[in-house]
Image (cartoon, rainbow, N blue to C red):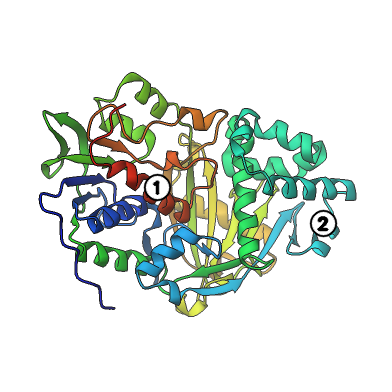
Amino acid sequence: MHLSAPPARAAGGERIGIVGGGMLGMTLALRLAERGRHVTLIESGSELGGLAAAWQIGEVRWDRHYHVTLASDARLRALLRDLGLESEIRWTLAQTGFYTDGRFYSMNNLVEFLRFPPLGIVDKLRLGLTIAYASRITDPERLESTDVESWLRRLSGNRTFERIWRPLLRAKLGERYRDASAAFIWAIIVRLYAARRAGLGAERFGYVPGGYARIIERFAARLENAGVDTLLGTRVASVRRQEDRIVVETTAGEQTFERVVVTANARIAARLCPQLDDDERSRLDDKVYGGIVCASLVLDRPLGPFYVTNITDEWVPFSAVIDMSAIVERREFGGAALAYLPKYVAPDDALFALDDASIETSFLAALERMYADFSPARVRAFRVSRVREVFALATPGYSKRLPPIATSVPGLYLVTSAHIVNATLNVNQTVGLAERALEIVDAPAPVRR
């Protein structure tokens, strides 16, 4: 594809450093470069993309973690349009299922919902009203004062909470669900409702042929064309202000800028920036993070008809089954099928210490018990991704404890995924955060508190 010539840089344009080459840092780098800034993107990994990057699973190269584009993902779709990829998105309708009491249930329409055996008719009515009510709340900040369990028990009833909500919360957050506010579940419900509205009553899921490997490749070319300098395999040790400059100490030596944006997670940002004041450090350090251990499986054929299988049986060692073959054409996988088995855990969970072979044995044994036609012989490749801190948990009063983007250190900015408030962590929200933060980072003069 032909890429336009890089924009003319403004005379004397500031040098801006961005720490972190995920989708957040990449989007900020592109938008700042388009405004004529001299941007350097510093990434510790060997490639750009962060959590959205692709990797090799046997003979298949696809996303390290599962990603799809929803019809309602306006910011992501606009970015893909800018990269010349939106028109290539392939859309499909996908089915959702539940695994409850050792059986699979389809949950894709009102009839199937009414037939769902684990709940009585009153329970189903209250569950439906809970979802409908939550989808219409426009001021989620007031939900931050209520813990998620109390809120769901009050609206859905005790039986529905015990049979549906608690297992789903534990699958997503472990026992830390007790620390979450009602805004956590609200954000999930609203995103699914937005997807249904955008899909005219059904959830439309899309992907770019080639997956995020192709998106990141196109994005990297666009950054280069825009004049962004990219430093890969460069770890940052500290970010400090010295006189009228911000000095970034890296494994490749010192880099000096007029402004620096740190996009690492809140806890890492606190360690990298020792000159932050006590209040800022406290706001960063009090964020509670959840992690993920996610297995990718290349199979001879799909596991079942569902894209997402929500699991409420607590003996299952993973949180859900994500069958990408329900959305992505199998020719993308060389005729094979691709599934993900995520397990959401606390950063100190013992699962992080297990090797791939132990996780494979446990996960495949569970699949054998769940699927009558499954056997380990069907697995062509198995690989495990581990990330200790993925998303900041929406705890009570979360939005009132956000760290500022413009810090007390002139010229230093923090834009982390923790700034995604009352929304789920996904690529669409990440791109939106970068574009909202742009006006603060690129203000005419460093903003002082």
Q: Amino acid at mark 1?
A: Arg
Does 283 sit above or below residue 168? above
Does 11 sit above or below residue 390? below
Q: Position of residue 366 (x, y in %)?
A: 62, 55
| CA distance for labels 2 and 1 | 42 Å
Residue 284, quarter of the rendered image: top left
Q: Position of residue 414 (x, y in %)?
A: 32, 37
Q: Is residue 427 left or right of residue 365?
A: left
Q: Which mark is residue 32?
A: none
Q: Position of residue 158 (x, y in %)?
A: 80, 36
Identified at 50% across, 32% down, the residue is 399
50 and 309: which is toward the camera? 50
Does 33 sit above or below residue 218? above
Does 296 sit above or below residue 131? below
302 and 79: which is toward the camera? 79
Identified at 35% across, 24% down, the residue is 281
Q: Position of residue 186 (x, y in %)?
A: 63, 43
- Report if residue 233 is visible in the image: yes
Identified at 71% across, 34% down, the residue is 151
Identified at 37% across, 62% down, the residue is 54
The mark lying in front, picked from 2 and 1, is: 1
Q: Is residue 122 left or right of residue 64?
A: right
Q: Is residue 26 left or right of residue 397?
A: left
Q: Residues within 10 Å of mark 1 (few under 14, many from 20)?
A: few
The furthest residue to the right: 121
Q: Earlier in the sequence, mark 2 or mark 1?
A: 2
Quadrant where the N terminus sits is bottom left
Q: Amino acid at mark 2?
A: Phe
Which residue is denoted by mark 2 in the rendering? 116
Quadrant where the C terminus sits is top left
Q: How many marks?
A: 2
Which residue is denoted by mark 1 in the rendering? 436
